[in-house]
Image (cartoon, rainbow, N blue to C red):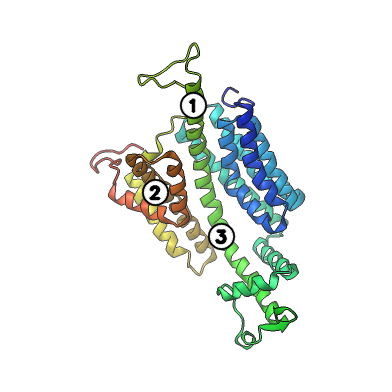
Amino acid sequence: MKDFPLWRSPKAAIVSTLLIAAPVLLLSLSPLSGMYAVLLVIFLLPLAVCLAGLTAGALPMLLGTAAGLVSLTVLGGRPGLILGSVYLLPIVAAFVLVVALRVPFRQSCPALIGVHLLALAGCYLLLQSWSGGNLYDRAGVAVMNALDRWELGDTMLYQLYSMGLVDLPENLRGSALQRVLGGYALSEAARSDLLLSVRTLVTTLLSSLVPNLIVSQSILGGVGCLLLPLRFGYLAAERRAFLSETAEGTVTDAQGRAQVDFPDLQMPRFETWHLPRGIGWQVGAALVAGYFLRSSASEGLRVAGAILYTAARSLFIIQGAALVNFMQKARGTKRTWRVIVPILLMLFSVLVFLGMFDQISNIRGLRKPRDTKEDF
């Protein structure tokens, strides 16, 4: 396929492969940092291999995927390999397919979101099946046992207690710490109680975190796996065309820039992304409804609220990032900062409020007047 040559250049292939493979493989070699390797695979690896495919070629994309599968195998054995394959392979295959067929962005983006959702749901169902339908409780027991065996487990338990994440009965607080040779240690009673509290904490957190993760990663991951590879892939193709523009047959536009045959999938400029007015109010209503339903006494309503809230929040994050990009371009901000700043703002939940503000105020003037039918 012309859009996915084996490699664009040996240098690009080597650098891309190292940047993808080295972090996940190194982190997977240490049990203490294995969780970071898992998080890298979930949140960043699909984006990284898709980006490598359009900027460096098919080989680094395949090697990066293989590195992720190897790291999960090191951490979880055969189950880790199965979960990694169920998650990564459909996403990479779907990305290659929509780009190779040049499916328009308005169809390919929802398709990538759907594939992310199915892949994550498949992993969740596998974990539930392997745990006998008690995934969250099994995870709590696993964390409790790991802390029980870890030589620094007492220190971690006391830190969690100091932070207020776990608690002790009144009668154990005064005698929780006992002096031992070389320092202090938790009493056996306090240690047992804190371990049980950690188990409850993990079970409770996962019951709300997992639905949020599936929804948010499906939306943000599906959009990101198209937005960034298409944008940076085009810039890389434009640079290659510019470097070879003296070659015979190079075509340039009216501004003298090299023309490139690149599968941009008719993706609109990111700074113009926005929710149409009608959809925006529906998303806002879902955000408010989800916020209140999350605290419902009914487990079904609580899960539904978490899904509604997370989906609406993710859409406003994307709109907030588009607004930031619009303002940065207006100010002539360098491309590097146009990537870094939105990521930092997302970490502090600022983009959600910016997206809501943009939807209400129409600060970019992208939505048409109310008496005019609005196109998406």
Q: Is 159 situated above or below 30?
A: below
Residue 275 visible somewhere in the drawing: no
Q: Which residue is mark 2?
A: 320
Q: Quadrant of residue 62?
A: top right
Q: CA distance from mark 3 to mark 2?
A: 23 Å
The residue under label 2 is which amino acid type?
A: Gly
- Earlier sequence position, callout 3 versus callout 1: 3
Q: For the residue carrying disc 2, how many other residues have a C-alpha within 10 Å: few (<14), some (14-19), or many (20+)?
A: many
Residue 285: where, in percent of width, then height? Answer: 37, 56
Q: For the residue carrying disc 3, how many other residues have a C-alpha within 10 Å: few (<14), some (14-19), or many (20+)?
A: some
Residue 320 visible somewhere in the drawing: yes
Q: CA distance from mark 3 to mark 1?
A: 42 Å
Tag 2 and tag 1, C-beta contact below 8 Å? no
Number of the front mark, 3 or 2: 2
Residue drawn where x is 65% and y is 73% of the image:
157
Q: Is 65 situated above or below 302?
A: above
Number of the front mark, 3 or 1: 1
The secondary structure type at the circle numbered 1 is helix
Q: Is 181 situated above or below 140?
A: below
Q: Which residue is mark 3?
A: 209
Residue 99's disc number = none
- Earlier sequence position, callout 3 versus callout 2: 3
Q: Which residue is mark 1?
A: 239
Residue drawn where x is 37% and y is 55% of the image:
353
Q: Residue at the top extreme?
A: 248
The residue under label 3 is which amino acid type?
A: Leu
The residue under label 1 is which amino acid type?
A: Arg
Lateral position of residue 366 relative to residue 251, left or right? left
Residue drawn where x is 58% and y is 63% of the image:
207
Number of the front mark, 2 or 1: 1
Q: CA distance from mark 2 to mark 1?
A: 29 Å
Residue 173: where, in percent of width, then height? Answer: 62, 85
